[in-house]
Amino acid sequence: MTISAFEPATLAGIKLKNRIIRSATYEGMADEKGFPTEKLKKLYINLAKGDVGAIITGYAATQADGKVSNAMAMVNHDDKINVFKEITDAVHEYGTPVIMQIAHCGRQTRSRITGFPTVAPSPVRNMYFMEDKPKALSEEGINEIIDNFVAAIVRAKKAGFDGVQLHLAHGYLLSDFLSSHANRRKDRWGGSTENKYRIVGEIFKRAREKVGDYPILVKMNAYDGRRKGMRIEEAVVIARMLENSGCAAIEVSCGCVEDGLFTIRGEKLPVEAVVEYNFNFKNYPDFAKKTIIWFAKTFLKTPKPLLKYNLDAAMQIKKAVNIPVIVVGGINNVEDVEDIIGNDKADFVSMSRPFIIEPDIVSKFKNRTQTTSKCIMCNFCVITIEKEPLKCRYGKLPKTKSA
């Protein structure tokens, strides 16, 4: 029997209206203390109204040194619980489950933002966040990271979220622990796959003691572009470890910030947006910016393929585990959605950019009033998020603000 993408489904006991999920997308809609704003609440309500199967929130930081900007939501103290509860209550009114993604940004942040030293598994400088050489976490620091993740999971449950998603992808802290490129430790937290996985396993173990069978999902890299980074063979092994740890579902993604637009691809590199908005170029004179734009357009190429670039990896992981697998990355039309679900290539699909331009894209797909997203994959939304709240830019730069 062929499964329809638009039929109700269950994910780790969570009832979904369909099998299309809004993948975690950083919104930049929190205040400086990490409290979610009314604008963020309205964004989630609009998604719920648009018939999305489930919402995975943009990542919330588990502790102060793990946030990427002053507009990032945080789940680091109990005082956030009631505010988030207002959001989950509002979204649940539309019969839509909402899952909180939690993260520590590791070496993909800046001490200038956090006010704390940048930390990582090993002191390997990030080629994008180059300002700080990260400090290798001590045993005590690692245990603090684990306990703060567990505390965040407890808070998410109290706030009414239907589950949490651990961010193990895109070069953030837990992703770096899993990668031999970033994790060069010689102790019990590095070296073998089992040792690199230990921090994730401990989060699951300690969380289960606090929240029982509360759904804990993950987003993980199947591969990246780093030397000695993640490859599908090791990702399959890690997926099996996750299942053994009690992981509820795996969302398969790829890449890290150092890889460039490897994770979120487009026809053209958004060079003008990068030069205008990225903190690395803030003090460059105009002639230097123009030179960089010319060089990038002449010599740099966007990664290929542009569509369904994680599907093959997701299919390999699905064969290796017995828990649901979600695939994200370059999925923007109803034909691909139905093919992936109908032919059992993945259990669920998730999208990010299509929901930015059209929060009601699932309703349009379901009713066949539209078969392809209007997103042009310009990726200006990704670049401008460093200074502006999440918004579809449709290939146009807004007036810049000071960093």
Image (cartoon, rainbow, N blue to C red):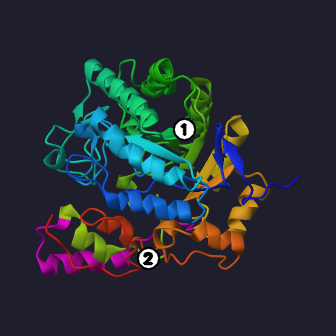
Please state if 184 lies on the left or on the right of 178 as rendered.
left
Dot placed on the residue nearer the N-terminal end, 2 or 1 = 1
Q: What residue is drawn where x is 40% and y is 27%? A: 150
Instruction: Give the labeled residue for mark 1.
Output: 217
Viewer-proximal residue among 398 and 229: 398
Using residue 120 as the reference point, say whether residue 197 is left or right of it. right
Asked whether, in this view, residue 229 is left or right of residue 314, the answer is left
How packed mark 2 is, by other alpha carbons closer than 10 Å (few <14, some 14-19, many 20 or more), is some
Is residue 137 left or right of 215 when viewed as pictured? left
Viewer-closest of 10 and 384:
10
Residue 228 on image: x %, y %: 44, 41
Q: Where residue 385 appears, x then y in whole percent? A: 31, 64
Q: Which residues are magenta?
A: 281-306
Q: In the image, is residue 134 above or below residue 307?
A: above
Identify the residue at image location x=31%, y=40%: 80
State which quadrant residue 246 falls in: top right
189 up-or-down from 45: above or below? above
Q: Is residue 183 visible?
A: yes
Q: Amino acid at mark 1?
A: Leu
Q: Position of residue 157 (x, y in %)?
A: 46, 34
The residue at which mark 2 appears reads as 268
Amino acid type, label 2: Lys
